[in-house]
Structure formats: structure tokens, C-alpha cells
Amino acid sequence: MGYFVVRNLYKSYGKNLVLDDINFSIEKGQVLSIIGRSGCGKTTLLRSLNYLESIDSGEVYLEDELLLSNEFPKKENDIIKKRIHYGLVFQSFNLFPQYNVYQNIELPLKLMEEKRKKDNLPSLLNKRIEEEILELLDKVGLKNKMDIYPSQLSGGQCQRVAIARAMALKPDILCFDEPTSALDPELTGEVLKVILELKVKYHLTMIIVTHEMAFAKTISDKVMFMDGGKIVDYGSPDDVFNSQNEKTKNFLKSSITLNQ
Amino acid sequence: MGQFGSVTLELLNGLASSFFLFILTLLISIPLGLLMCFCTMSKFKPLSWLFQGIVLVLRGTPLMLQIFVIFYVPGLLFGFQWPTMNTGWSWFDATFSTRFIAALVAFGINYAAYFSEIFRGGIQSIPKGQFEAGAVLGMSRREIFRKVILLQMIKRIVPPMGNEIITLVKDTSLANVIAVTELMFRAQQQLNKGLIWPIFYAGLFYFLFNALITYLLKIAERKLEYIKI
Ligand SMILES: Nc1ncnc2c1ncn2[C@@H]1O[C@H](COP(=O)(O)OP(=O)(O)O)[C@@H](O)[C@H]1O
Ligand SMILES: [Mg+2]
């Protein structure tokens, strides 16, 4: 069995089947990109993995630990313990506006440390929390912005803070939902560069929903093309971008014309 | 002491009574309103419906009527008497009478209903992404509310809360219908004695009090300005 395994995942909203038998697995340190038209279920997949939506059936395993099934944990604390395996970076950043850059990262980290202490779990920190946060900000190139409020940052900077914040709890799998879709075109580069560095320098395991095809080609170990809630194509970037599947070909053709 | 001095003293006692009614109403209705707000927003539907109904009635009927009901009905039905409380303050001739306590209960509940709607609007105006960002960062619902939502909500509700608070200052005069010896009651007593000017004098007290509150609200707004939502 692989490092991270998703098996027979189904999810519907009312009569609308949004995730239709999703199966895939990724290895530690690998990057999976998910591509597909708007409305095909990409966001729902990430949200389900992160416990923001309940699923109808299916299982998700991380190193043989059952992370997700249709039996949602009843206690909030149990959900939190599962959730900490993931980080999620949203399209719209969702930084906390009343806190500055430093505090945006400090808040969840401190609260998590308090909870872990109460539960007699080991600390997540390898060094002092201040150093830990500065190191994170350094990774996204924003060490000099730590006392700035989100409203004073550009979209690209906001998203880089959000990435640092998502990494603070040392997730096993870092998920991105169209991290550059809300950005002006000239700002997407700086964010994509940071994400690429996370792979090259730190070997993070990541799942990235993206419309940036060139980026997906470069960064991915695996690419998944979804359509109507189903996985249509899954494989190495070479396989998927040269797929003979009509649906995949059509999608790739339309996204190329869109990008030009 | 001349007439002006004695009337001033009378009115100041009334003002003290009005002020206590005002401040105690806020102390009761803000936490109670938050509780009502959570109940109306509860996922447990019967609880939500019950409190939506309560809020509807409290906002849909005159406060004056509610004051009457709360003062008279428990006595008529159950022989229940609202308690009194003697402050023992020599400068304050109006003890917290049964009438005062009944008025306070009515104000507390009525304003809690108004505040609960403001709180609900405040919470619902905060983007879902804020709750979700907190959640995926491993924060509990309680932590998300206290550390992420609350301050943003406060920023949004300061203006509508300000309106209600200013209305409350003036509404305290409604307690006069069950003869609570608040500011308007005292001014009316002077009127009954044939003195007209104390009514305007009382009006000046209300005005100055609200001017002070308006000023404090401005400061609060300025302090929260750094939060850009
Ligand atoms: N909260 C919801 N309630 C009902 N339907 C939803 C909800 N969220 C998404 N959907 C539907 O699920 C499908 C997949 O949506 P989504 O996962 O957001 O697609 P994508 O991210 O690929 O654009 C769409 O048809 C959408 O209308
Ligand atoms: Mg989406």
C-alpha cells in the first residue's frame, strides 16, 4: 500500500453525484496535480479530504492509518487530530485580518501546542516558536513583512503567508485549491515559485488543484484529470499531457487556447 | 438652596436611576443577546425555532407593553413579587424598588432580542473562509469564535450597536409607565407642580449623555480601523 491512499470515494450533494469513485495513491514527497473544468469536483475532493465536507462512502489512509471514512468522528477533538495531517491553502487566502503576518502563523500554532500539551502529545516545535515562525516566513520570502497586516500586502504576498501558515502545523500532505486563481497574472509567478521550492528543497507531499498547465507539468509526479466527478486520466505528466483520451485532449486543447 | 438647586438635585437622582437602568440593561442584555443569538443559530431546529419566535415577539411588540406585563403579570398569576434592593447610599434616594427591578428585567430581555439580531447579522457577514481557515488549522469552534470571529464581528456591529445604545438611553424614560423614579418621572413631577423648564433641563441631560456615548463610539470605531475586512 502507498503512503497516501484514497479508495472508492463517493460524495453527492442531494441527487448530484460530485465525486464518483475516486481512487488514487501518492508516495511520500510526491506532488499530485488535479486538473479539470470548473465544476468537475476538484474543490469538493480537497474539502472532503480536509473534513470540510462529509463523504458518502470511501476510505482515506495515510501510512495505514484510517484518516477518513463515512463515519465522521463525533468528538471535535478527534476530527482535529485527523485534520492536522493536512494543510489547505485556499484560493482566497483567508488570512485573519486582525492579526499581522507573524500573528497569523502564531495563533494556530500556539493553540495547537496548548491542545497537544493537554493531551500529553509531543510538541510540534523543534525550536523556539519565534524562530520556527521566522523560518517559515523565510521559506516564503516574507521575513521582512512580519509585522504588516494582510490588508497592506499584495495578493501574492498574502498567498505566500497563507502557505507559511499552512505549513506551520507540519502537515503530512499540503493541499492547494487553485492557489493563483485569485491573483493578478503578474503575481502568480512568485507564488508558483514558492510552491516549486517546497518540492525541490523540502520534498513536501502536495496535492495541487490548478489551471496552470505549464506549472502542473513541471512540478508534478502524478497528474489527475477529472471530469464530471470521475477520474478520467491519471498518471505521470507525460502520460496525461499526451493522453489519447478524447476528453483529456479536448480539455488540454481548450486550456491552451485559454492561456494564450 | 434655591429652586434651581433643589430641582437639579431631584433630577440628578432621577439621572442616577436612569443611568443604573441603562448600564445594568447593557450588562444583562449583551451576554443574554449573545446566548439568544447562538440559540437562534443552533443546528438543533426546535431550539432555533423557539428562540426565533421569542425574538420575533420581543421585537414585534412595544417595550412599554412588555414592561407592564413583566411588572404586573407574575403578581396577578402567581402572586410573585419582584425583589427590592436597598443600596444604602445616602445620596441616592431611589432604592432599587420592585418597579425598578421589573423594568430592568423587561429592558434586559427586550434589548437582548435586538442585540441578538445584530450579533447574528455580524456573525453571518463574516466570510465562510474565515471559519474554514481556522478549522483546517486545527482550531476548535470555540477557538475560532473567540480568536478569529469575535473581533471582526465587533468591528461590524459597533455602528448598529451604537444606534441601539443611544436609543436605550432615551428608552429608559419608558420605565416611567410603572412609576420608576427615573429622570423623566422626576421632571414630570416638577411639571405637575407647575414648573415647565425642568422638562427641558432633563432633555439636556439625555442629550449630554448621548453626546458622550457618541464620542466613545467614535473612539471604538477608530481603534478598530486597522482591521480591514
Ligand atoms: N455546497 C454545495 N452544495 C451543492 N452543490 C455543490 C456545493 N459545492 C459544490 N457543489 C457542486 O458540486 C460540483 C463540483 O463543484 P466543485 O468541487 O466546486 O468543482 P471545481 O472545484 O472542480 O470547480 C458542482 O456541480 C457544484 O455545483
Ligand atoms: Mg474549485
Image (cartoon, coloured by chain):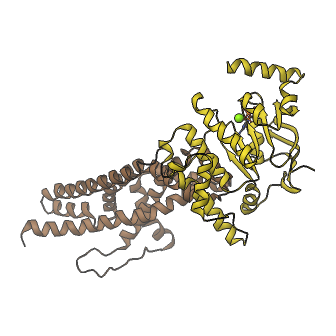
Chain colours: A yellow, B brown
Q: Nearer the viewer, residue B138 or A173?
A: A173
The answer, for residue A83, to whether it is visible in the render is: yes
Q: Measured along the vertical axis of the image, is residue B86 above or below residue A207?
A: below
Image x and y of residue A41, in percent: 77, 35
Q: Residue furthest left?
A: B2
Picture layout, residue A36 above or below residue B157:
above
Q: How many marks?
A: 0
Relative side of B8 to A21, left or right? left
Q: State the quadrant of the C terminus of chain A.
A: top right
Q: Nearer the viewer, residue B99 or A119?
A: A119
Provide residue A145's location: percent of width, then percent of height. Answer: 50, 48
Of the four image quadrants, the one with ligand 1 is: top right
Tell me the quarter of the picture where residue A208 sits.
top right
Q: Residue at x 35, y 65 (%)?
A: B21
- In this rendering, the answer to whether B174 lies above or below A194 is below
Residue A74 spot, x, y in % from top left: 77, 60
Residue with the most extreme front position? A201
Q: Residue at x 47, y 74 (%)?
A: B80
* Residue B179 makes an appearance in the image: no
Task: Name which residue lies at 79% across and 22% down.
Answer: A251
Front one among B141 and B187 = B141
User: Is B172 displayed left or right of B153 in the figure?
Assistant: left
Where, by quadrant of the figure, is residue A255 drawn? Answer: top right
Closest to the observer, A160 or A116: A160
Position in image of residue B153 (x %, y %): 50, 51
